[in-house]
Amino acid sequence: MIKRTGKRTLLFQNGVYMRAAAAVAGKKEGEGPLKSWFDKIFEDEYMREDSFEKAESMLQKEALQLALKKGHLSHDHLQYCFAGDLLNQCIGSSFGVRDLGVPFLGLYGACSTMALSLGIASVFVEGGAAETAAAVTSSHFCSSERQFRFPLEYGSQRTPTAQWTVTAAGAVIVSSHKAPVKVASYTAGEIVDFGVKDANNMGAAMAPAAASTLLHYFEDTGQSPSDFDCIFTGDLGAVGTSLLYELLAREGVDLSKNHRDCGLMIFERKRQDVHAGGSGCGCIGSVLSGYIFKNLEAGKLRRVLCCGTGALLSTVSTGQGESIPSVAHCVELTREENI
Amino acid sequence: MIKRTGKRTLLFQNGVYMRAAAAVAGKKEGEGPLKSWFDKIFEDEYMREDSFEKAESMLQKEALQLALKKGHLSHDHLQYCFAGDLLNQCIGSSFGVRDLGVPFLGLYGACSTMALSLGIASVFVEGGAAETAAAVTSSHFCSSERQFRFPLEYGSQRTPTAQWTVTAAGAVIVSSHKAPVKVASYTAGEIVDFGVKDANNMGAAMAPAAASTLLHYFEDTGQSPSDFDCIFTGDLGAVGTSLLYELLAREGVDLSKNHRDCGLMIFERKRQDVHAGGSGCGCIGSVLSGYIFKNLEAGKLRRVLCCGTGALLSTVSTGQGESIPSVAHCVELTREENI
């Protein structure tokens, strides 16, 4: 039986291992600080497809194929594919993995989807429902802008709190077979809504959700930030990160010493003109599957938390004057000794 | 450990029980053949909210609250809420369960979402990750028409193969505590795409996915349709149902004797002018949580399959000339003896 600790945290003691992972990214991401950690960089934002949405599906397909290849696996080894993205009806995923021939479990956690899918995939593996499963997610700047904001051709001004949707995808293969990097725990988050209504300030909307999930994790496990090499959040950006520090400080938790936000890691903010930082499912998706996984594999990181953060809004809910409900899911990744 | 049988079917032998379920529906559904099986019928399509989308969220909220009440439970008893719907970014769910204070795992399986969420919730319970969890889904005719088709005010003509999105929600509480109705197995489906491009003929697009998942179930378990009181499909409608029979007949499986499609059960097609039948997440969602669950509880049904069917299209994918990838997820429900 899967071990639960405290109120919300699942500990994977049988062993859920990250067999392989792959990250693919677009041109702008490939010019950023993490360029050497991506497995493939596309110079063309269409990825040789004829629409941005098809390009996004291609990102997922490429990431998954690369991850399988790196794990010396084929599609046949997968029992399940957990995937999701930001596009309406999650078409990035359904078209991306359409030809896979593997049971497909579609998820929607907005930009928290990588942590959500990795968490659920791990429950399946730990519980014995699967030996091997994939967790995949993506986002694309151009498909997101078109869907959530304005046609690119308008050349709209962006507010200082706005974030830049990352063009990238990440795929992780989890398995019950021993490997150096382990998924040690999963803490699912509740929906938190502090009433933020500005769709151009999603970091502020998501920070309370990240705080909630991290506090639950610390309470459930008796751990504190100093027990980790690093605590990664998904895409809070500059605004959300400082709010997260403030919210946690009120509870006596100092996160500032060993925290990094994937949205702040993936771009050099000023040079790349991304305002408050990167965002999108592909942000933590590609950073986790690239930088974080590779550093764990190499033993340069030994214990981390990855807290994916999602803003559960739509253009309709915003248009109807609603605030932005948010959610954060957290997975703990560790480097096993002697493997 | 969760027992897997064959290639894709998970058997829940520790025991996953349906502690309670509730179905709420709109006026038209409340005038249909299943009217006496709904727990609550709303006469007003706005459900006293000020938009169709908020009304859909209210449907989910009501269904979940009723299910909890019927199970003599409060929110505090839930470890997880699995929910999804058809609206862009699944706002029916995120706003519907926003105030719950329970870890939220968002899913997207289009109209298969009830079977998908019930399947994943069951894996969590069977594996020990949860004692009690909720699976919730909804659809709303007016929010769907606005999003996927035309503003209602246009009074557009519907094609004969078109289906009518059901205004309804269903909520199921699953638990490890013994109860009369059991979730016995879950078979997840792969994405199947036979190249159907007509978004007004989703039954045809989904039938091959239903056939695929049902065939996998029969192969995995050695069972055949005659082993069941009834095999329910989600929302294939008239067109999809006859295609499903044809596809299965080619494989030597005769489904016609004890099959019912929730999309054909929920409306009286001619009198209620719904063309090929009902559809939407709320279709199988409310029929499973109402008619099917209550008949199992009363012992009038003893063993059924519920095969939710989802068409994974969006207006963008259709506009770009894409075909309609589909998926079907199947849960087996049984009435336990002596409980």
Image (tube, coloured by chain):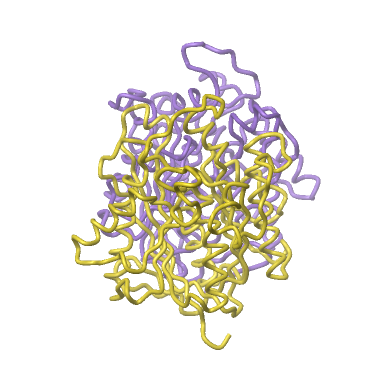
Chain colours: A purple, B yellow
Question: What residue is at 65 percent from the left and 29 percent from the top?
Answer: A318
Most extreme residue toward the top is A154
Residue A201 rendering spot, x and y as whole percentages: 66, 28
- Image vertical order of residue B325 relative to residue A14, above or below: above
Residue A217 in sight here:
no
Left or right relative to A61: residue B108: right
Left or right relative to A325: residue A83: left
Q: Nearer the viewer, residue B194 or B76?
A: B194
Residue B193 rendering spot, x and y as whole percentages: 28, 45
Residue B89 location, quadrant:
top right
Left or right relative to A236: residue B243: left
Q: Nearer the viewer, residue A276 or A120?
A: A120
Q: Nearer the viewer, residue B123 or A17?
A: B123
Q: Nearer the viewer, residue A277 or B77?
A: B77
**The C terminus of chain A lies in quadrant:** bottom left
Residue B143 location, quadrant:
top right
Most extreme residue toward the bottom is B338
Most extreme residue toward the front is B271
Residue A268 rendering spot, x and y as whole percentages: 53, 25
Question: What residue is at 45 percent from the left and 34 percent from the top?
Answer: A139
Residue B120 in sight here:
yes
Total residue callouts: 0
Residue A146 rendering spot, x and y as whole percentages: 48, 23
